[in-house]
Image (cartoon, helix red, strand yellow):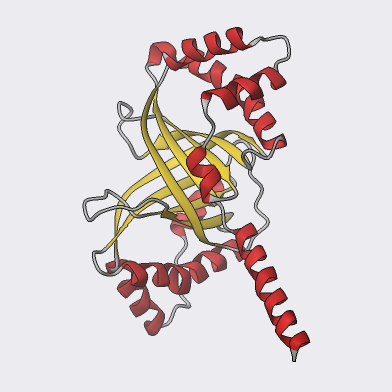
Amino acid sequence: MKRSILMLLLLTLLSGAIWAQETRYLVFEFFKVESSEMYDFIEHKDFMEKVYQSAINDKKISGWDFWSLQSGADSGEFQYITITYYDNPVSMMNGLNEEDLVKYAMIAYPHLNAKAVKDKFSLANRAFDLKQRSYMQQIANSKDSFKMKRGILASFDLMKATEGRFQEYERAEREVFLPIHQSRIEKGLMGSWVLLRTALPFGSEAKSTHLTMNMYKDYVQFFNAQEYEDMESTADQRAKIEQGLKSRDQKWVYLATLEGTVR
C-alpha cells in the first residue's frame, strides 16, 4: 500500500515537472524607431544577439526573438517586436536588469569594459522608444517540428475574451480552433500555433487578454493558408466555431518577419 502511494506521488511530481517544462513565459516589447535612427537601432540589435546568447548560456533566459512588422499597425506606433523567453514566472518578472546586461555584454565582447558597455547602451537607448511591454504565459500549442529561423512569418493576433466568458474562450481555442490549426499544419499550410494568456492581473478595461502566434515558413505557405477552405467540416463543427468566435473580440492582427533569433 505504501509503495502504491509513493508511486502515485512520484508520478504526480513527474507529470508536474513535464508540465512545467512545456509552460513558457514570454515578454513582448514593442519598439518605435525614427527613420533617422534605423541604422543605429539595427546595429544595436546585432550587438544584442550575442548578449542574449550569453544570457541563454547562463540559463538566465531560454530564448530571444527579433521581429520586424510588415502590417497591422501605423508605422508611427511601432515597427519592431522582441520576445524574451523564460522558464518560470519569477524569472520573467525579474527580467534582465542593467547589471545583468552589462555582465553578459562583457562576456560576449571581452574587449569592452563596464563603462564602454554602459556608454554603448546609453547611446543605443536614444535610437528607440519602448511603446509597450506585455507579460504572457503559454497555455496551449500545436504539435509540430517547426524551426525558428530568420525569414519565417508570424501573425500575432491580439484577443480580448468577452466579459464573463474567459474560460469559455480558452476552451474554444483548445477544443475547437487548435484541432483546425493542427490539421492545417499536417496539410503543410501552417508551421506552428501557440496560445498565450496575459500573465499579470488585469481589469475589464484591458485592451487584450490573450494572444495567438500563427507561424508560417514563407509567404507561399501564408497565402495558401489564407485561401484554404475546409470543405469537410460538419454543421456541428461550424456551429462550434461560430460559438467560439462569440467568446472573444479579435482586437488586432500584426504580421511580422523574424529578423533574428537566439536559443
Identify the residue shown where x is 56% and y is 23%.
Answer: 99
Question: x and y percent of residue 194 in the render?
Answer: 51, 56
Which quadrant is the C terminus positioned in?
A: top right
Question: x and y percent of residue 87 in the render?
Answer: 60, 49
Residue 106 appears left or right of 252: right
Observer-nearest of 256 and 112: 112
Identify the residue shown where x is 78% and y is 85%.
Answer: 3
As drawn, the residue found furthest toward the front would be: 2
Residue 167 appears left or right of 26: left
Identify the residue shown where x is 32% and y is 36%.
Answer: 73
Task: Name above or below for residue 94 compared with residue 7.
Answer: above
Which quadrant is the N terminus positioned in?
A: bottom right
Identify the residue shown where x is 64% and y is 20%.
Answer: 105
Task: Name above or below for residue 209 compared with residue 150.
Answer: below
Task: Name above or below for residue 33 compared with residue 36.
Answer: below
Q: Image quadrant of residue 132?
A: top left
**Residue 219 seen in the figure:** no
How many marks overall? 0
Residue 8 appears left or right of 227: right
Q: Image quadrant of residue 145?
A: bottom right
Q: Image quadrant of residue 250?
A: bottom left
Observer-nearest of 162 and 218: 162
Question: x and y percent of residue 30 in the render?
Answer: 40, 33
